[in-house]
Image: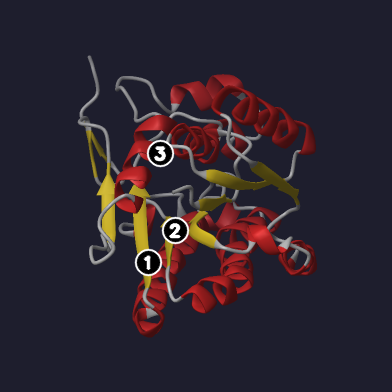
Amino acid sequence: MNKIVLITGATSGIGKACAEKFAAAKHNLIITGRRQERLDELKATLETRLGIAVLSLCFDVQDKAAVAAAFEGLPAEWKKISILINNAGLALGKDSFENADIQDWETMLNTNVHGLLYVSKAVLPFMIEQKAGHIINLGSVAGKEVYENGNVYCASKFAVDSITKAMRIDLLKHNIKVTAVNPGAVETEFSLVRFKGATAKAAAAYDGFTPLTAMDIAQTVFFCASLPPHVCINDLSITCIQQAGTYYFYKNQ
């Protein structure tokens, strides 16, 4: 039976790959993002190619009012959300603490932490009413170990780690699964966004090793979401074979 899967930040990278993976399994999707044209393109592609239903919602997860309005206005048939994938997030800058841009800090915290909270809070009443659901939060190995010049990005992902653990405990009584998937280096638009469009610098971030792909993570998320109802993967970290933790890499010579 088709489930309804909600994916935030679905216009690129891991979010888009998750949309493609769950759509291929014939699940209906709610996709969100800030870029309406990309949402429209993804919706049209998935509906035409795979014959599923897709609802697109264009808003910025940083905007608490916009998030609330989007889900308060959700048509009744779309409220039966089975899986929420909190994917929207970003890194901005990679500067030493004393040189970092405060606006970058605020954007990371507002997106990676507040955005996850706003969306989760808006969707939870639907899951509680169904007495079932699965929340999958995209964390990072940077939420397990701090690395040099990672400062507030790491802090935001440590917050995701703590919030995920708290959700898991508090939502036990509602029969809601909560999973954290924590990727290492994944080659998406992540580094291009982090380095603010500096393509050479972004590409250099993956020099000397073969990073994970967005579909690697989507397949992992799909696996976590496809287990029997009594099974929940609580916390899963995934890296490429040449990475161990946040700063140990074995790079090609």
Q: Indicate the secondary structure of the residue bearing disc 2.
A: strand
Q: Does 124 sit above or below residue 203?
A: below
Q: In this rendered view, identify the residue nearer to me: 216 or 126.
A: 126
Horizontal and vertical percent position of residue 106: 66, 61
Can you identify the residue that label 2 sits on?
137
Give left or right: position of 106 versus 176.
Answer: right
Whether label 1 touches label 2, CB < 8 Å: yes
Q: In this rendered view, identify the residue nearer to me: 227 or 206.
A: 227
Q: Indicate the secondary structure of the residue bearing disc 3.
A: helix
Amino acid type at image mark 3: Ala
Real-space Cα separation, disc 3 to disc 2, in angstroms: 12 Å
* Residue in the image at 71% along x and 28% along y: 41
Horizontal and vertical percent position of residue 160: 45, 65
Give left or right: position of 183 versus 5.
Answer: left
Q: In this rendered view, identify the residue nearer to me: 135 or 242.
A: 135
**Residue 139 image-quadrant placement:** bottom left
Can you identify the residue that label 1 sits on?
178
Whether label 1 touches label 3, CB < 8 Å: no
Residue 90 in view of the camera: yes
Amino acid type at image mark 2: Asn
For the rendered model, the colour scheme is: secondary structure
Real-space Cα separation, disc 1 to disc 2, in angstroms: 8 Å
Residue lying at the far top in this picture: please name it: 253
* Residue in the image at 79% along x and 66% along y: 69
Q: How many marks?
A: 3
Can you identify the residue that label 3 sits on?
218
**Residue 145 image-quadrant placement:** bottom left
Horizontal and vertical percent position of residue 251: 24, 23
* Residue in the image at 37% along x and 20% along y: 207
Q: Indicate the secondary structure of the residue bearing disc 1.
A: strand
Residue lying at the far front in this picture: please name it: 1
Horizontal and vertical percent position of residue 37: 78, 32
